[in-house]
Image: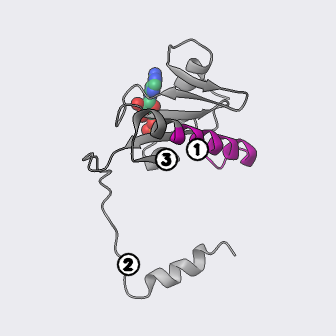
Amino acid sequence: MEETIFTKIRDGKIPSVTLYKDEQCFVIMDINPIIKGHCLVIADKPYKNIGECPQSVLNHMMEVAKKMDAKLRDVLHCDGTNVMINNDPASGQEVPHLHIHVIPRYTNDGRKFGFAHDKYEEGEMVKLGERLCLG
Ligand code: AMP
């Protein structure tokens, strides 16, 4: 597996503020936070996306993200969090090494993610829904 900026952090080659570490993942403070306290739950191995990541590891990472959410609420008294994964470069992923962002949010903090919205033609959503059904 390739070296990434996060494997370098994992291996202590680049400094970080590490909040947690176990065999499957580790948590660091994001160096360029959307809001202070923004942290990253990073897979120990550099899976590029959720498809490459074993389900058990992904489940564990989400458990750790849940604990980080609780910690941020407890310590920073944030009102909510964004828990999100940029999954491959097309989605905005800059570091090709699976990680979950946990970002503290406050009521009326003024941050907007700024996605433009698409619009379905008549009947298009139902048709597409039929193709996307998980069964
Ligand atoms: P993404 O765009 O989802 O790949 O997010 C990558 C995140 O990694 C960004 O929010 C960066 O600010 C963060 N990041 C990049 N380099 C470092 C670093 N050396 N230490 C901490 N966070 C970093």
Q: Earlier in the sequence, mark 1 or mark 2?
A: 1
Residue found at x 52% / y 83%: 127
Q: Main secondary structure of the magenta part?
A: helix
Q: Quadrant of the C terminus?
A: bottom right
Q: Are marks 2 and 3 in contact (CB under 8 Å)?
A: no
Q: Residue at x 45, y 49 (%)?
A: 91
Residue 32 in the image: above or below residue 101 = above
Q: Residues within 10 Å of mark 2 (few under 14, many from 20)?
A: few
The amino acid pointed to by label 1 is: Lys
Earlier residue among tags 3 and 1: 1
Q: Amino acid at mark 3?
A: Val
Left or right for 55, reference 13: right
Query: Label 2 sits on what residue type?
Result: Tyr
Residue to which mark 2 is pinned? 120
CA distance separating discs 1 and 2: 34 Å
Q: Are marks 1 and 2 in contact (CB under 8 Å)?
A: no
At mark 1, the secondary structure is helix
- Select label 2 or label 3 by which is in front: 3
The span from disc 2 to disc 3 (Cα, nearest Å) is 27 Å
Image quadrant where residue 100 sits: top right
Of the two numbered discs 3 and 1 in the rendering, the one whose residue sits closer to the viewer = 1
Measuring from the top left, give residue 57's x and y in whole percent.
Answer: 71, 41
Question: Which label's residue is closer to the chain start, 2 or 3?
Answer: 3
Quarter of the image where the N terminus is located: top right
Q: Is residue 62 visible?
A: yes
Q: Is 71 one of the magenta-colored residues?
A: no
Q: Residue at horizontal 54%, vertical 36%?
A: 96
Residue for badge 1? 66
Residue drawn where x is 46% and y is 80% of the image: 125
Quarter assignment of residue 106: top left
Q: Which residue is mark 3?
A: 83
